[in-house]
Image (cartoon, rainbow, N blue to C red):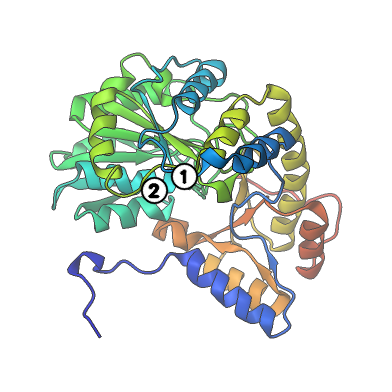
Amino acid sequence: MLPDSDRLGETQEYYFSMKLREIAELRSRGHAILNLGIGSPDLPPAPEVLEALTESARQPDSHGYQPYTGRPELREAFARWYATYFGVDLDPTCELLPLMGSKEGIMHISMSFLNPGDEVLVPDPGYPTYRSATELAGGVVRGYALTDSGGWLPDLEALENEGLDKVKIMWINYPHMPTGAAAPAGFFHRLIEFARRNRILLVNDNPYAFILTDSVQSILSVPGAREVALELSSLSKAQNMAGWRVGVLAGAEPYLQTVLRFKSNMDSGMFLPVQRAATVALGLGSEWYAALNAEYRKRREVAYRIMDALDCHYRRDQVGLFVWARCPGGTDGYGTCDRALYEKDVFITPGGIFGPAGNDYVRISLCSPIPVLEEALSRLGGGARVPHQSQPQ
Ligand SMILES: Cc1ncc(COP(=O)(O)O)c(C=O)c1O
């Protein structure tokens, strides 16, 4: 056997990659596992999106390599989408770089800007890929703890007091996964000033912008943001296209050119029918998002009742595709999830996989139909229609 590369270091296989294998094994042994773990939308994309895909796939000239920067029509569609929903004007020729999902963008950014030893501010709890991409790129992770009492927002003053000389990148992700926190008014402005003062590249990972939010927000709407900030967006969640792998990196041309130097050596463009269909998806009107959120709102009520059945405490003002809740005193998320999986055949996610600050929490995905959520509720011992009082903590 060849030894692993030093670069792999402590990096392990992605949690869901391992867990879904275990679930497949349990199912093969006859366990009817309900999967409330991963945020992969179960609802289909819009019919016109599917139509555009199949129509384009039938054309004989749809199958070759595509431009490394995506088709101009796709970049123009992203620019219209940003202008319509986020109120941000971006130049489609140079300020938008289509990606195969935002996850690859996290790796590309890390590889394009980090030198060994550069520090990266990573939210704890937060999406695990910020951490692994930093480590794979040779950077040093500096986790910044988010707390319920702090509104799940970074304490910028404390970070400045600790010293930020070696910090090159800060990852933020609002609406925040897994806590469901939204960015309050003025918060993005404060972050941009912080990034300027400390000469940090701020990257907002924004796949949940449309899900159960009161307003759709982009960090690039802050004046001057383009000097210090990039944003990742994705069609995985709000357009129900997680498996299609379509995202975009938005920001100033010099940053995107740097990322392209790395990315264009990694892939050879995105399948044309996917780009054509994504162009249609980006043109969906506000009624699409309203219908989607009407469904998620109903599902969230059942998810809250599951949390009640588990005796977990949660805020009712959460946004995004998950419900996040604190386990009852004395138990941690891993124990709660293990009991649900091994005793009730229900898979929910332990908060600890998002960082140590998530250890006492669990996360339920809204990507299952209501009958499945209700079946999970009944297996976990719930059923009362009126949830007991849950206090935010
Ligand atoms: C915070 C966050 N960022 C990025 C991603 C990856 O999204 P994509 O499918 O665009 O790669 C996810 C997926 O769950 C996520 O939760």
As drawn, the label of residue 118 is none
Q: Is mark 2 on a helix, strand or loop?
A: helix
Residue type indicated by callout 1: Gly
Verify CB contact (< 8 Å) between mark 2 and mark 1. yes
Residue 12 is situated, as x and y percent measured from the top left of the image, at 36, 69
Q: Dividing the image into 4 quarters, which one contains the N terminus? A: bottom left
Residue 214 is situated, as x and y percent measured from the top left of the image, at 63, 26
Q: How crowded is mark 1: few (under 14 residues within 10 Å), some or many (20 or more)?
A: many
Residue 84 is situated, as x and y percent measured from the top left of the image, at 56, 16
In this rendered view, identify the residue nearer to me: 374 or 17: 17
In this rendered view, identify the residue nearer to me: 111 or 351: 111
Q: In which quarter of the image is residue 379?
A: bottom right
Q: Is mark 1 within 8 Å of ligand 1?
A: yes
Residue in view at x 24 percent, y 68 percent: 9
Q: Does the residue labelled 2 lie within 8 Å of ligand 1?
A: yes
Vertical relation: 236 (above or below) 255: below
Relative to residue 40, is residue 165 drawn left or right? left
Residue 117 is situated, as x and y percent measured from the top left of the image, at 13, 52
- Residue 393 shows in the view: no
Residue type indicated by callout 2: Glu
Vertical relation: 322 (above or below) 252: below
Question: Distance between the Cα atoms at labels 2 and 1?
Answer: 6 Å
Q: What element carries label 1?
A: loop
According to the image, label 1 marks what residue? 101
- Residue 378 shows in the view: yes
As drawn, the label of residue 104 is 2
Vertical relation: 173 (above or below) 333: above
Vertical relation: 17 (above or below) 226: below
